[in-house]
Image (cartoon, helix red, strand yellow):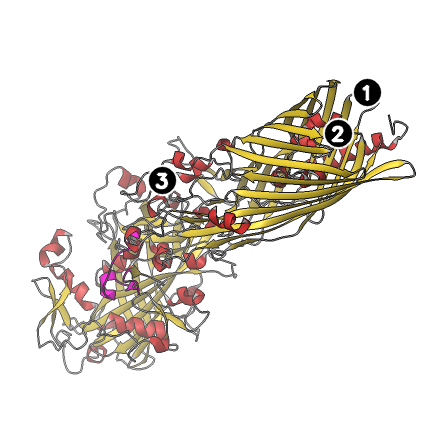
Amino acid sequence: MAALSMTACAVTEGNAPSFEELGYYKCTQDSDCGDKRYCNEDLYCASDCRRDADCYLFAPSGMICSNEGRCLYEWELVDGDGEESGEGEGEGEGEGEGELTDIVCDKPADCTADQWPEDCGNRQCFDYGYQYTCDPSGKCLDNKTVDYGTSSGEDSPANDYVGVWGLLLPTGARTSDIPLVGFQDTVSINHYLVRIRHDGNGGLIMDETMCFLRLKNYYEEPVSKELGWMVIPQNYIDHVPVVQHHVAAADLEPLEAGNAFKTDRMWEIRGVHLEDPLNDELPVRSDVDAGDDRVWDQDKDGNVGMTTEMQGVLTGQVYSDQRWSNQMTGEIVDADHIKGEPDPTYEQHAIGASSTTLLQDQATSMVHPEGKLTYFRMLRLDEDASCDEVMEMANEEQGNYLCWTWFEDDEECVLFEE
Amino acid sequence: MKGTSFHCPVRAHLIMLAILCFAAVIPDSAQAAGFRMMGYDVSAIGSGNSQVAYGDGFGVLYTNPALMSRFQEKMGASFIFYRPELKIELGKRPANADIPISIYDARVGKLEGGLDRAVPTLETQHYRTDTSVDGFNPYLGLGMTQSFGIEGFRFGSMALIPIGDVANTVTRYSDEREQYYSNQVHFTRFGEWDNMISGFLGVSYSPVKYVSLGVSVQVALAMLANINIYIPEATVQDYMLTTSKASIEWAFRPIVGVQVEPIEYLAMGLVFRAEKYIKIDGRGSINMWNYHKTFEDSSINVTVPNRPASKLSWAVDYEPMELASSVGFNYEGFKMQAVLTWERWSQFLDTSAQRPEEAAEFRALNRNDAIVNGEDYKWSDTLSVNVGAEYKYLTWATVKAGWGFSPSPVPMQKGRTNYADNDVMMVAVGHIFDFEILKHQFSAELGFQFWYMFDRVVYKDPGQVRDEFADGSVSLFGGEVMNESYGLQTNNPGFPSYKQGGWMVVSGGSLNYHF
């Protein structure tokens, strides 16, 4: 009787919620869910990871984050090309000579509206290799060959330089007057896809397309945990224009081991239009607050200047303008390798932020006193090389000439997961 | 009067007072709330905690202090333990209810509600698990009543001291914020109590044969704590300097009772017990080296040291205001009484110092989310019933029995909160042995209770649970819509369901010396 009464007094409140009530995003295949998302067994979009490191809690080792945001063991990947099933972008498409591709680029009118040269759309196409150029229709055109310009003569030393190269350009900087930590040392790790072509006068033009830019905090003493770090969004990188260095014919030595390599000084302005890019004052936050209309939304994300992301203890977006310059001086290692020391200059101001705590007007930047953090290395690549290939070498190939080492003469690379 | 030449009782009262003072320097807690249902001594345990009209144990300091003048002066010690076997089993969650790790890439905001941001389910400090409450909890009880030679007067004191951990207080969140801590659902009113000392002091006086009056106080305290932290190097997070300041204030729960015996065979009791809880207010501040903020309300471009501080607030050991009335009969060695207790649970404060109706409401992240009406989650006042009986079948032996039913004040927990509780029923038995040694009168007593919490299965209403990953969230980089954010994602440990229930035994023995 007691047991009966105890059972009788038990209560159940509510009903088990159905999937329909829970409102998840329905899907039929992974592609319905976007990058780094997959369609799970219940046919709803899910995401387990963003990078391999996120898979640690699924299994301490051996799992990787697939393109669809799943943590998988390597043997679970379907084919052997390092990608999941299906063809990658551009694979197996069999385009004909001079054919338009589906890659979108800025039309000439878009470029001039932003006060840039009409061919600024090439920037989006060069990511895929210098055989691509932007057609006025707004699509990248596959030219099948790379335009290197016209040589000044068969015996010109420039002939040996022309080609497609990869450039690794780490630059160390020290930013002072930062709260909590006093100062912060940072290395900007720049990877470029470079085309060296003739300038028609016996010299060279180096077209430099930024493939990737990462920031890495540098500590002279080990720290238990990083408090904050800056992340450069892909959107930022996509809106950095192609920049050019020139090597005058008079400075050009034959491409032989031990000879010198020297470029001119290149200047680049980000987030602001200046009448005199070298000498005009770079706008600061008070100028922007007062309505300075020289700043502009270069990365087209709705915020002035260029947007970077702060992560760690303080999170949010910082909007900045920047002026920097660089001149490279080095030596020829051999016909396929060049290395040396750049001579950069910096000027940067935070002109806005998503949170006032991220606005540090007192902060000032300078080139880091430890010179070995700043160096450059160039490696000759195949003519059809793309930014993806540059990054594959930099991220995955220990010992590759383009993979980044903390110091110029270090042997061990710091590989990045993508 | 027996024992008036016995001098130890006065000294013993001082010892008892010292014990109560000791009790005051450590936080009193929910433990007292546990014995309020079981009874504070072996006599109350054997009678089903029904001693409002009749009673002869130190536990009447809680049930009805007016009864102290109705029994012989005595002092005694007891050993009591309780052992619960309670369980909360959590229901299986759909995979999409988990907070994905990609929430780290979402714009989560810092405005109201945005700071209670979920951590990815995989990275919670503790995985969501069932709750088992099954510890053995022994206590030493000490008590005394004394007339000081005044007819009809009694002064009484009692302390219940845990054997083992003397002080153990835990505060919890009843909602999804518990994901940062135990990530479990916890019992609120019954079974999951902390170990603490509790004590009473009281007086009783019977001016005429038919009436007795009594007042007692349950000793409690309020504590204020300030914690100051200085971090000299923000990047070295395992080194910091700390100072603290704690101040303690006494708090008392008054209990007032009256008992009348209009005729020899009939007694009636009426008791008022005030609401009681321990409010703990604190403040924590953090100083860091070279950490500044812009000077507010000034056009001058200066910075000042930034010293963030936050206020802390808890409420532990909540016991509701109670009004208990009882009628008892006494005939030829047989006594029986029934108690009806009104408990004002509608004013309940949980350990986070929130009322359930406040805790249930939240700021919705999604535009189409239903607005939760907190009143649906307000606790109810309850009426509990206790019945006790005893029969003196020999001059030296008395048998006792009791029964009790305590309905749950907790409404259906279909929303954000997880106050695990249900109706509980109790049966009790006890026995008294009276004996003499060298012409001194003693008694030994045994008591036993069995409690049963009825099973209760709770299913959540998805529309009443806080979605911790806003539908249509966009990524920090590129502003892409994150499809995995659609629908309900929550780390609320009670979602989508939980089942609770179990039982508990209470037992004890005591030895008393009658003056």
Q: Amino acid at mark 3?
A: Arg
Residue count near mark 1 (Cα–Cα under 10 Å), binned few <14, some 14–19, many ≥20: few
Q: Are marks 3 and 2 on the same chain?
A: yes
Residue toward you, B333 or B97: B333
Quarter containing the C terminus of chain A: bottom left
* Residue lying farthest to the front in this orientation: B332
Mark number displayed over residue B168: none
Q: Are marks 3 and 1 on the same chain?
A: yes
Q: Write the start and end of the magenta stretch as one range.
A: A22-44
Q: Is residue B167 shown left or right of residue A241? A: right
Magenta-drawn stretch, dominant element (helix, strand or loop):
loop
Chain containing mark 3: B
Chain containing mark 2: B
Say whether residue B294 is visible: no
- The residue tagged 2 is B156
Q: Disc 3 or 2, which lies upstream in sequence?
A: 2
In space, the residues marked 3 and 2 are separated at their CA atoms by: 51 Å
Q: Amino acid at mark 1?
A: Ile
In space, the residues marked 3 and 1 are separated at their CA atoms by: 62 Å
Where is residue B52? Give x, y as percent.
Answer: 65, 30
Residue depicted at 54% across the width and 31% down the height: B343
Residue count near mark 3 (Cα–Cα under 10 Å), binned few <14, some 14–19, many ≥20: few
Q: Is residue A43 magenta?
A: yes
Q: Is residue A399 shown left or right of residue B487? A: right
Residue depicted at 34% across the width and 72% down the height: A394
Element carrying mark 2: strand
Mark number displayed over residue B363: 3
In space, the residues marked 2 and 1 are separated at their CA atoms by: 14 Å
- The residue tagged 1 is B150
Say whether residue B18 is visible: yes
Chain containing mark 1: B
